[in-house]
Amino acid sequence: MTLLALPVATAAQARRQLATAIRPDRRGAVLAMLLLVATTVSGLVVPPVLGRLVDVAQAGGPRTYLTAPLVVLAVAVVGQGLFAALGLAMLTRVGEGALARLRESVLDRALGLPQERLEQGGTGDLVSRVGDDVDRVSDALRQGFPEFLFSGLTVALTIVGLGVLDWRFALAGLAAVPFQVMAGRLYVKVSPPLYAAARRAEGERSQQLVETLGGLRTVQALLLGPRHLDRVAVRSEAARRAHLHAVDRSAWFFCRIHLGELTGTAAVLVAGAVLVGNGSATLGEATAAALYFIRLFDPISALLTLLDEVQSATASLARLAGVAMLEEPEPEGAPAPAAPVLRLRDVRFSYLEGDEVLHGVDLDVAAGEHVAVVGSSGAGKTTLAALVAGIHTPSGGTIEIGGSSVAALGREELARHVTLVSQEVHVFAGTVADDLRLARPDATDDDLAAALGVVDALGWARALPDGLATRVGSGGATLTPVQAQQLALARLVLRGADVAVLDEATAEAGSAGARVLESGMRRALEGRTALLVAHRLTTAAEADRVVVLEQGRVVEVGPPAELAAGDGPYARLWAAWSASR
Amino acid sequence: MRLAFRNSRTGLFTTSFLLCVHQVCEATTPVIVGLAIDRAIAPGSVPKVLVWVAVLAAVYVVLSAAGNGAGPIGARASTRAEHDLRQRVVARLLDPRGTTEPQSTGSALSVAGSDAEKVGETVDVMAVGISGLVALLVASAALMLTSVTLGLVALGCVLVAVVVVPLLARPIQERSAAQQQAAADSSGLAVDLVEGLRVLHGLGAQRHAADRFRASSQAARRARVRAGTTEAALDGVTLVIAGFLLVAVAGVGAHLTIDGAISPGELVAGVGLAQFLVGPVARLSWAGAGIATVRASARRIADVLEAPYAVKDVATGHGHDARQLGSGLRVTGLVTEHLDGLDLEVGPGELVAVVCDDLSARRELLDALARRRDPDGGTVLVGGVSSTDLALDDLHRAVAVVPHEATLFTEPLVDVVGETPGPALAAARADDVAASLVDDGSRHHGTTLSGGQRQRISLARALAADPPVLVLDDPTTALDAVTEAAVAQGLHALRAGRRTTIVVTSSPAVLAVADRVVLVDGGRAAAVGTHAALVADDRYAAAVLS
C-alpha cells in the first residue's frame, strides 16, 4: 500500500510563503538592508585607502601624507563595526519575527489537519516537519541568511568598487565569473535531489528509532534486540551514504571555485603589470585592485557555499510550506445544533476505496440518553465513534446533531457540542493544569479541581510533588494509564460539550483500573448525551440502550436487560461475558 | 567517549592535516600577490608576472586538492563516528540489564538522533580548530620574516582579539543558553502537540493548542532577539578589532616602507597577511564555541552509556545449561515496595492466572519475573535455578514477559509471527487481522489497526515465539466478550500441558481456563484455587466480578 504523503511545496511556493511571513515587518527589513549596505560600503573604503598608503610609501613620504588615509581607515573600520552591529540586530529582529510567524502558521495548519489526512501521511512525517524542518529553517535564517546577504552585497559592491577604481581591472576580474557561474549552477541543479534524498533517508532513520526505542520493552521481552539494532544500523548507514553522496558532489564544486579565484587573480595581476608598465595606472591602484579581488574570495565562496545551506533550508522550507499550504475546507457553517440529539442515516465509510467498513448505519440517540455500542473487535465501532465526533467524514449517508449536519458544522462549532475521548491516551507535556486547560483555557484553579474531583482524580493530583503544577507527560512525571485517562475525562468535563463520545475509554487501564474509570465516567457523563463504545459489558449494562455492531452493520438495538434476556447477538455476548462470573 | 572515534581517528588526522595544508596555501596567496606586485608589476613586466602566476597556480593545485579532500574525508570520519555512537546508544538502551536511570522515549530519541550527530561533528570542529591554530602560527611566522616589527604589531592585535573576544562572549553564552532552552521548549511543545493530535481532535481543542504554541513560540522569539542583539554587538566589536589590526599593520608598515626597511611589495604582503589572520582567529573561536555544544551532547550520551545497570548479568553457560532448564517457575518470599513475601508456584505446562488489583504490585512482580529489577528479597527459580544465576539472555530465552502495550513494528508479517504462524494466529483469533496485513505489512507500527486488532496480533506474536515460560500482562483488555472467551480457549489449547504460562489478568473468561488462580492481596498470595472455587471468596469476587 502506498502512503499518501503530506505534500511538499515547490521552491517558488516556499519562497512566497517566506515573503508572506516577512511582509508585516517590511520597514524593519528595508532598514536592516540599508544598514548592511552601509556596512559593506564602509568596508569598501579600505582597499583604495591601503592603495593610497602604498603609493605614499613607495614615493618615500612625506610621512604627514600618511595621516589622512590612516584616519579615514580608522573611521571606516569603526563605521563598519557599528553598522554591522546595528544591521545584524535589526536583521535578527525581522528574521525572528518572520520565523515565528512561519512556524506558528505551520503548526496552526498541522493542528487543523483532518485526521484522515494525518493517517494517510503518518504522524512521523508531520512530527519531523514541525520539529527538524522548523529547526533547520531557523538555523539557516539565523546563520546562513545574514551571511548570504552580507556576502552578496560585498561581492556586488566590490565589483562596483573595482569598476570605479579602473574599469579595466573590473574587466580582468570578470575572468573568474564563468567558473563561479558553473559552480553555482552545479549546486542549484545537482544538489537539491541529493539533499532531498539525504533528508528522506534521515527521516527513515528517525522513524526506525521511534519504533525501536518506543517499543523498547517489547523488543527486550521478545529478544528482538539484535534484529532491531540491525535495522537501526541499516537505516543509519543508508542515511550516512546519502549524506556522503551529497558531500562528494560538493568537492567538485569547490574545484571550480578555486579555478575561478586563480583565473581572476592572474588576470588582475597581468592587467596590473600591463597598466603599470604603460603608465596608465599607479602601483597603488594595482595594489588596491589586487586587494579588492582577494577580498572577494571569502564572500564568493561563502555565497556559493551558502547556496548549499540555502538549498537544504529550501528543502525544509518546502516541506513546511507544503503543510502551510494545505487549505482546510472550512464548512459553510450550518446553524448551531438545536439540541444534543444524534441522528444517523445510512452512514457508510471506507478508509480505502472499495473497502467499506460501515455499510449503512441508522441510529437515533435522544437528548441525555446513553447508548452503548458493542460488537466484536474490528466491527467498526471506533470508526462509528470517529464519524459522530466529526473526525472522519462519512463516505455516504448523514450524521446530524440537533438537526445540523456534522459535516457542515464549522470545526469550532462542532467542538462546542461534541467531545471524543479516544482509546489513545496522550498526556500533554507540561503541568497537570496546562494539560487540563487545553480543554478550557480560562478555567480557574477551582474549575480544574472540581473537574478532577468529578473523575476521582483530585486525590492523586494533589498528592503529586507540586500538585497541579507538577510537570507530566514527556520529560515530566509518568502517570499510570488510569491517571492519564482520568485526565482525559476531566478534560471532557471541563470542555462541557453536551454530547460525549467515548471510545473504549477504559481499554488501556487494565481490569482493575477500568472499574475506577467507570465510576468517574458515570459522573462525568451525567446530564450529557453519550455514545459509548464498550467491550466491558458492565459499561454496556448501565446504558439506556445498546447497539450491537457486526461487520459494519447494526444487527440489534434495545435496552441491555431486554436484549440480554433474548437470544440475539447481545445475549450471546452477555452469556460469554457472564459465563465465568 | 574516545571510543566512539576509534574508527574515525585516521579520518580526523587526515582531515586536520589537509585543512592545515589548505590554510597554509591560503596564507601564501597574499604573500605571492605581494611579491608579484613588488617584483613584476612595479617594473611593469608581463613575463615576470606570468612566472608569479605560475607559482600561484602551483599553490592553488595543492590548495584545491587539500581543501576538496578534506571535505569528503572529514564527512566520512564524522558520520562514521556518529553512526558508531548511535549504535552504541541504541545497543545500551536495548541491553537486557536495563538501567537505573530510565529515559523518556523522547529524550532517548534525541540522544540517539541529534546528540550522536553533534558529537560526530567533533571531527569537523577539531580539524577546523587545529588548522586555524596552524594557519595562525604560519601566517605570524611569515609576517615575522617580512619584518619583526610588523609581525609583533600584528601578533599584539591578535592577542587582543583572543583575550577580549572571549571576555565579551561570556554574557552571550548565558543569553544563548536561555535562548536555546526557550527554542527547545517551543519545538518540544510543537512535537508533543502533534503527537497528541488525535486526542486534540477528539477534544476539539486545536485552537487552544495553537494559542499555547503561539505563546511559547513568541517567548522563544523574544529570547532569540535578546541573544541575537548581543551577538550582533560582539560581531561589531570583532570587526572593529580586526579592522584596527589592519590599520596598525598598514600604518606601521607604511612608515617602515618609507624608512626603507621593507619594500612596497612586502607592505602589501603584510597587509594581506594581516587581513588573512582574521580568518584563523575566527576559526579558533568557532571551534571553541563548537566544542561547548559538543560537550553538552557528549555529556547526555555519556549519561546513557554510563548509567548503572539495573541488574547484574552472569556469563552465559555459567554452570547452567540453559537448554536443559526445566520450565517450572517458582517465586518464593518476593519482597518489593508493594509485595510482602509473595509465593507463587507454577509447574511445567501449567497455565496459572494471577489476579492483582494493585497496579504497583503487579508491575513489581512482572519486573521481578523478567529480572528488569532485582527484588528487595525473595527468589525467582526457573526450572529450579535462581534467575540471578542465569545469564540474562538465557533467562529471557526461557521466560518471556510480554508487556501490556501492544507495540507493533513496521515489518513484514513473517517477522512478526514467523514462518508457520497458523496455530498462534488461530489461538489469538488473529487470522483475519493477519490476512489484512499480508498485503501491506503493518504500517505506522499498526496504528491503522483497532485496539483489539493490535492486541490480538501482539498476542499471536508472543505465542508464535513459543517461549518455555510465557508471562502475559492483561492480554485481552481491548477484546469484546465473545472474542475474549475464544482467545482464552485458544490460549489454553495451544499451551496447556505443553508450555508454562502465567497470565496476570482479572478477566473472568481467562481466569476460567486457568489451571489455578492466585489472588494477590496485601502483597501476598491471599488465595489459591480454581476460578470456580474462588468465586465464593469475597475479596476475589470484588476484584474480578464487579
Image (cartoon, coloured by chain):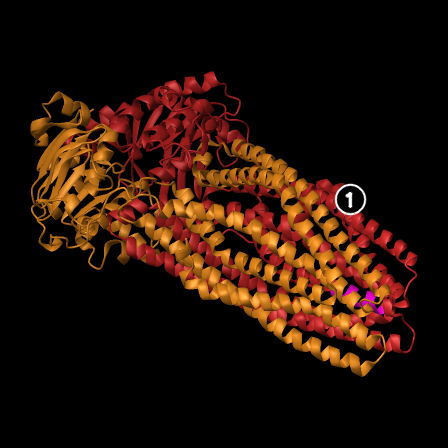
- The quarter of the rendered structure image containing the N terminus of chain A is bottom left
Whether residue B532 appears in magenta in the rendering, the answer is no
Q: Position of residue A426 (x, y in %)?
A: 40, 35
Query: Where, by quadrant of the figure, is residue A457 drawn?
Result: top left
Front position in the image: B363 or B33:
B33
- Residue bounds of the magenta highlight: A286-294
Q: Colour of chain B?
A: orange
Residue B338 relative to residue A202: left or right: left
Whether residue A290 appears in magenta in the rendering, the answer is yes
In the image, residue B292 sits, relative to residue A108, either above or below, namely: below
Disc 1 packing (10 Å; few <14; some 14–19; many ≥20): some
Q: Which chain is red?
A: A
The amino acid type found where label 1 is placed reads Leu
Residue at image position (65%, 69%) is B25
Q: Position of residue A114 (x, y in %)?
A: 49, 42
In the image, residue A270 sits, relative to residue B331, either above or below, namely: below
Q: Position of residue B333 (x, y in %)?
A: 12, 32
